[in-house]
Image (tube, grey):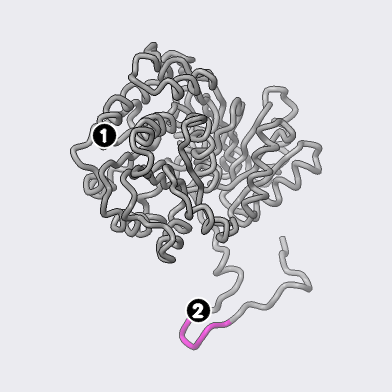
Amino acid sequence: MNTQNKNTRPPQHSKRGQKPIGRAGQNKKKESKLDPNLFVKKAQPSGQVGFRSETPFATLNLNAILLKNLEAKGYESMTNIQEQAIPSLLENRDILGISNTGSGKTGAFLIPIIEQARLDPRNFTALIVTPTRELALQIEEEFKSLSKGMNLYSNTFIGGTNINSDFKALNRKLNVIVGCPGRLLDLANRKLLHLNQINTLVLDEFDRMLDMGFVNDVKKIVHGMTKRKHTMLFSATLDATQKQLIDSLLNNPVTVKVNTGVSTNENVDQEVIRVPEGKDKFEVLENLFRSNDLEKVIIFTETKRLADRLSKQLNQAGIKSGLIHGNKSQNFRNRTIDEFKAGLTQVLVATDVAARGIDVADVSHVINYQLPMSMDSYIHRIGRTGRAGKTGRAITFAN
């Protein structure tokens, strides 16, 4: 198909000896090397068994207001990761925690943080670092609901928002600071965020935080935390190549593995749809929506451009769709997710920015419109369904 039109600029040429910079060089398509057969697996749903323990929160020596807030949210018994992690965290032990998405990891680190903060609110600050803005906002929302009525203060610091509001927020004592590395370092470099006054560090989705995209920023943050006494690392996946770095961050840690860190959620029924050469992939997708089973769906693409096009096609086909990726403003992304949560849209089309941090109840299906580039990406993508012990379904398109 000819993609040139009268508005297309001619390729730009670089200095002598260098290759020309044109569309072909800029948009060279990356091909996934993953075997699609890896994405075929029947669910072995455990329901609430294997997700929640039978141990009630009341068995822990928690503040009465915190217990009341947990009860108000419908949390009576702990999940497995919470049961195994919280007692050690209340004793200020460092931790490496591995558990599936939707298994209660956020509560596992927030509950001990709230307990520690209430004992000495004037001298306690925890920094929770996340790879995505959506995850940061979700964590602070959970903190506010769990700490309601306890006079503890928090704020989220992420890109895509007005930095002037960050200046104002940092003028008060914060017990919990949540953010992404770029904005946090920016504020630290401006001498507005004082890393040397923070006691506790949490790296949520630490596997992503310690990969090539974030690791240097994380090292800078850690270096500035000269009074760090407590470190918690949580994720659904574990990269064996990061062991040395993990060991350097943790001091005599407790290791809690509810799953291996290299396997997919057992509560997700996984299948592959092979699209023959020349077949219209969107037509195959549209046909899936003729089934009433696809109630609340997240569709993942590898590129922003395809996400834009796919969302437009879905809406034109009468399938209400929202869209989020890195080129969208934070306000746009927040509004889109709120509409998806509220059921105003049936589909959320996203790049991997949504694979970590979107906690939407009852997502019935995850569809990989393009093969993910890594198994870790796949695990986090399909972790958006089959959450909280429920059964979900993942469909991956392959040629």
From mark 2 to mark 1, how far is it between C-alphas?
55 Å
Residue 101, horizontal then vertical, whole percent: 46, 32
Residue located 40% across and 33% down the image: 114
Q: Classify the position of the N terminus by image quarter.
A: bottom right
Q: Quick check: 84 left or right of 327?
A: left
When asked about the image quadrant of residue 207, the answer is: top left
> Can you give x and y, in whole percent of width and height, for residue 266 in the image?
44, 23
Residue 92 image position (x, y, % from top left): 26, 34
Instruction: Look at 52% across and 35% down and name the residue there.
Output: 144
Residue pointed to by mark 1: 92
Residue 18 covered by magenta stretch: yes
Report which residue position mark 2 lands on: 19
Q: Residue at x 60, y 25 (%)?
A: 362
Q: Select label 2 or label 1 by which is in front.
A: 1
Left or right placement of residue 291 versus residue 237 in this view: right
Q: Nearer the viewer, residue 276 or 220?
A: 220
Q: Amino acid at mark 1?
A: Asn
Whether residue 382 appears in this view of the structure is no
The tag earlier along the polypeptide, 2 or 1, is 2
Identify the residue at image location x=78%, y=42%: 315
**What's the mark number on residue 77?**
none
Q: Which residues are the magenta region?
A: 13-19
Q: Residues within 10 Å of mark 1 (few under 14, many from 20)?
A: some
Q: Could you tell me the amino acid type at mark 2?
A: Lys
Which is the main secondary structure of the residues drawn in magenta?
loop
Q: Residue furthest left?
A: 252
Judged from this view, the residue extending furthest toward the top is: 54
- Which quadrant, please, contains the C terminus? top right
Inspect this view and state whether residue 191 appears: yes
300 vs 229, left or right, is: right
The crowd level at tag 2 (other Cα within 10 Å; few <14, some 14-19, many 20+) is few
